[in-house]
Image (cartoon, rainbow, N blue to C red):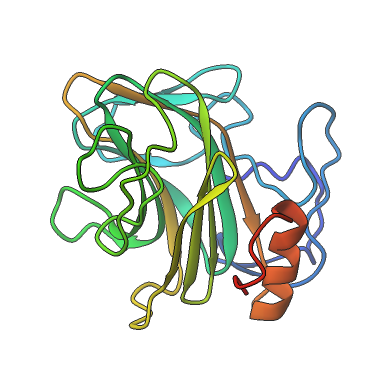
Amino acid sequence: PGWNDHGTGDPNALTQTRGFIVEWDGAPPASTSSGSATQGWLQPFASGTLGGWTQDKPGAWRATADGTVVALGPNAHLVSPNSMTNFEFKAEIRSDTGANGGMYFRVVGVTDKRFPDGYEAQIYNVGADTRTGGLFGFRDTTAQLARDGEWFTQHVIAIGNHIVILVKGQVATDYLDQQNRFTAGKFGLQSNTQGKSVSYRKVMIKPLPADPSAAWAEARKDVPELPASIR
């Protein structure tokens, strides 16, 4: 529940345990719908609803018919019902001036009652020390890769302990977590600034193989411009 697989009905495409997608077993699930659906990608909000994702502040998030989800901050999080290990996770994002947000992944809980416990691909276009494209708390970036008020794409690739974050097709973070802190978990979206909104559209998740070599080969089909050193 909570995923839109576009009616493939393929029981072999994904391994599911009590509703939690944990790894990709074979060929990606193929889309059978018309429009912008892309083979292998799950689109949780394509139906114009929140798709079974949980709000930590009920009523903070709303979905529109075109699949956009938006919330006013602060501390508004939307968390998936499903977990995954290796994957690609991308969205188009637009933030109000000065707004802070994030794309969370491998979320394993909420330990301090405020923020999900997992990795966060930062969304903050005016930060002095950390900006959009950084891996919050692990690897910061100060490059100005996106601007408030404009739609931009952020794309996360997580394979084993190797995490890559691209903004507008440019690698912003290439990080190996030597402690391998989070190996699998849920996905989340954040709007974190008082009275300001962050909007997400075309949110897409693609399960990747458990084998790292096969996973990187699949990811390169989507991002052929990845540097050869990333593998």
Which of 73 and 176 lies nearest the eye of the viewer? Answer: 176
Q: Is residue 169 depicted above or below 230 in this figure?
A: above
Which of 5 and 219 lies nearest the eye of the viewer? Answer: 219
Which of 167 and 56 lies nearest the eye of the viewer? Answer: 167
The C terminus, quarter of image: bottom right
Q: Does 202 sit left or right of 215 as displayed?
A: left
What residue sits 63% from the left and 40% below the top? 43
Pick out the residue farthest to the left.
112
Tell me residue 104's x, y (percent): 38, 51
What residue sits 83% from the left and 50% below the top? 30
Q: Does 30 sit left or right of 80 as displayed?
A: right
Which of 35 and 22 lies nearest the eye of the viewer? Answer: 35
Q: Is residue 183 depicted above or below 198 in this figure?
A: below
What residue sits 56% from the left and 44% below the top? 90
Q: Quadrant of residue 100?
A: top left
Tell me residue 23's x, y (percent): 62, 70
What residue sits 48% from the left and 32% below the top? 50
Q: Does 129 sit left or right of 198 as displayed?
A: left
Q: Quadrant of residue 197?
A: top left
Tell me residue 25's x, y (percent): 73, 72
Tell me residue 103's x, y (percent): 40, 46
